[in-house]
Amino acid sequence: MQRLQTVLVRLKYLTARADGDFGPKTKTALQAFQSDWRLTPDGVYGPGTRAALLKALVPVYKPTVVSRPSPNHEPRRGTDIDVILLHHTASNRASVDLATLRKGSGPNRVSAHYLVAPGGTLYQLVQDSRAAWHAGVSSLRGETKPSVNLRSIGIELTNDGSGTTPFTEEQYRILERLVPYLARTYRVPKENILGHRDVAPGRKTDPADNFDWARVRRAVDAVL
């Protein structure tokens, strides 16, 4: 019991020192953790909760970003982030993609929160707290409100989307850190880590078929 309490203290769910007594405060702290991790908040220290606590102790870090602000964003209007959406840019040049995502006038203005260049440079164009314009006409399993833009983080990968141009090792290494960090930080359900094609079927095909989803999902599974 002291080990459980020590973990809850480390995770800041419990402020008292571990005393080995499973009292009301420990149960309430455990229920809060279970709720945050989308487990049944029954206060029972079972196998599922034990596994989640171990994953919660695995540190996550945001990769270093290069700031390239885009003017194309809006308030989230109180909507929680519960989707991470991956795209390809339909270009193999990050400089072209940056220009497109930062274009501040004219029709069809777009943006994303992050752009991952082939060499592994991670650009941040829109702050997470704001809604970027990356999803277009879309829905999450048929739900159109709140809009996908309002509820999501958008990550663009510089890639032409042909299905034959490889996504680079450097891009995957960034995603293996960035996606788990975002998922943990905003408590995004694993089933809501998606591609643009999943929220705009028939209209979008990104990321391309040669994208290694399994690699990203393994990184997420290690911390969620």
Image: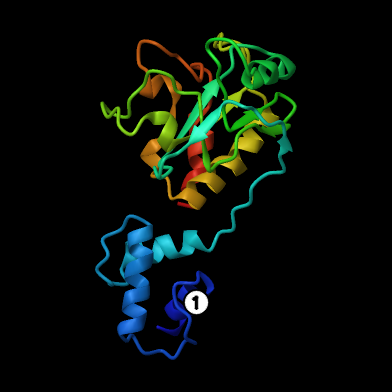
Q: Is residue 162 left or right of residue 195?
A: right
- In the picture, the quarter occupied by the N terminus is bottom left
Q: Which colour scheme is used?
A: rainbow
In x, y percent, where is residue 172? Answer: 62, 32
Q: Position of residue 37 (x, y in %)?
A: 38, 57
- Is residue 18 visible in the rendered image? The answer is yes
Q: Residue visible at 53% across and 73% down?
A: 10
Residue 88 vs residue 221: left or right? right
> Which quadrant would residue 152 be assigned to in this image?
top left
Determine which residue is flagged by label 1.
9
Q: Is residue 194 above or below residue 167?
A: below
Q: At x 32% / y 78%, what residue is drawn? A: 27
Residue 34 locus on image (x, y percent): 34, 63
86 over 36 or under it: above or below? above
As drawn, is 51 to the left or to the right of 211?
left
Horizontal relation, residue 38 to residue 173: left or right: left
Circle 1 Cα neighbour tier, 10 Å, few/some/many (<14 / 14–19 / ≥20) = some
Residue 222 seen in this snapshot: no
- Which residue is at the far front? 105
Count of marks placed on residues:
1
The front one of 210 and 73 is 73
- Label 1: which secondary element: helix
Query: The disc labelled 1 sits on which kind of residue?
Result: Val
Above or below, 59 against 207 in this view is below
Q: Nearer the viewer, residue 139 or 184?
A: 139
Q: What's the residue at 59%, 11% (across, down)?
A: 90
